[in-house]
Amino acid sequence: MSFQPVLPLTGYAGWRFLERTMERQQEAFNNSPATRKELDYFASNIGKVTSADELVSDYRLLKVALGAFGLQDEIGNKYFIKKVLTEGVDDKGALANKLADKSYYKLAEAFRFISSGGSAAAIEKDFASELSLKIEGAGYLAVTTSTGGVAYTRDASLKRGADGQIVTAEGYTVASVTDASDEKIAFSGVTIPDLAKSVSINDKGQVYGYFEEGGQGLLLGRLALSSFADEESLAVLGADQTTEEADATLVDREQAYFVATEESGKPIAGRPLQDGFGSFVRGEAVEAVEAQQAFDTETIAAAFLTRSFEVAVGEQDDSMRLALNIDRELATLSAGDMSEDAKWFSIMGSEPMRAVFDTAFGLPNSFASLDLDRQLDVYKTRAKAMFGEASVVQFSDDAMRDKLIKLYMVRTETNTGAGYSSGQIALRLLGG
């Protein structure tokens, strides 16, 4: 038997009850056998997906994917969903960029590994954004190249390689410190286990893996730094030593790879923040990392749980579902960096949010057929008259969203023939 939310009351009183019991009811829903079964299947199988065809042909995977973005009713529209996923979001002419409902854009963005020809498993375990670092102060990373040689670099934009080891952008294995007594460098590097959910590297180069949300980090290893008696005499990796290209002063020292020479002296290995060595700091994510926006199974699962609970509530009381939706969506939208007009247009383009605002503002069904600029003027005028400001940003305040939901709930009761007199309606709007 599927989970059924407890909703003993309707209207605003019912909403207040739901608010008070939300945490317990959501937890019960999340832990119900049917829900856990769906999410376990998704987590176990999404990593095998490499195309839109594979995703839309698996009903259980598609159910979670669409449900996470409130698109569960589109599960039968496979051709359309396939087109959204295949075209992605990078091209301005992509279908997801043209649709008024931005849920499709969010879907395509979250599953962008499909449009880029990758896989969820490969992207999810890359950790490139978490491992994007900079070396502040003295020192070079020691790495093993594809030919097995040793090179040195200050480029610390790292990632997890195919074998689990921390590597540079070029795939070179990064060395670690293994013996504190003599600072020996191990070129076996630091390995991030497959089960790791996230990783972090502190200023001392200590690499921690995290295996559960909020759990204690496990020390996986420690990155080493190296210095030279004369670093200006380092040679550029792969350069023709008989030409000017061998001059390391002509290259970007923060990006290039170097090899030791007789003049530079042998490398001196050490720990960050000790014996004159610098430290690691968080770097700006490289453009490729920003563009990739790694697939996050846990985020999809959390969104699916939230949306699915709202659907379960809506099966008993649709007005409650709309209230839950706008409380969540409006909090995010109002705090965003879009212009105020763009935010209002987003509300008008979202059928669930529009339903709440139109009802709260007392607007007729025919209002949506007016010119958009006229609708915008009316929305701003009503918002200022009823909430004090013409802006959407005011709804970042919990109290203002609650006031909006209260207006919506009371007017909904009135519109469905609850039988309140004008005086009772006024008291309910003004009172508790």
Image: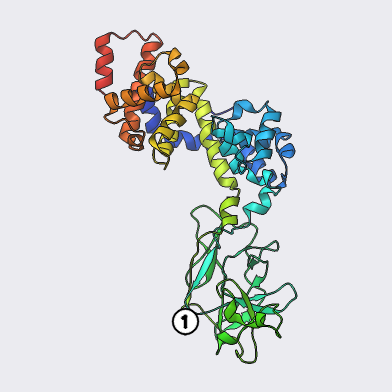
Residue 69 in the image: above or below residue 221: above
- Which amino acid lies under the numbered mark 1 shown in the image of this protein? Gln
- Image quarter of the N terminus: top right
Give whichever of 356, 262 is nearer the camera.
262
How crowded is the residue under tag 1: few (<14 C-alpha within 10 Å), some, or many (20+)?
A: few
Q: Examine the rendering and report whether any part of residue 118 can be seen.
A: yes
Give whichever of 272, 8 is nearer the camera.
272
Image position, residue 226 (x, y; %): 56, 81
Image position, residue 326 (x, y; %): 43, 30
Q: What count of labels does the image hold?
A: 1
Image position, residue 22 (x, y; %): 42, 33
Image position, residue 137 (x, y; %): 47, 77
> What residue appears at the point 41 percent right and 13 percent down from the top-left corner?
364
Residue 250 in the image: above or below residue 358: below
Q: Examine the rendering and report whether any part of residue 5 can be seen.
A: no
Query: Mark 1 sits on what residue?
Result: 274
Q: Quadrant of residue 49?
A: top right
Q: Quadrant of residue 38?
A: top right
- In the image, taking residue 45 as reference, residue 363 lies left or right, namely left
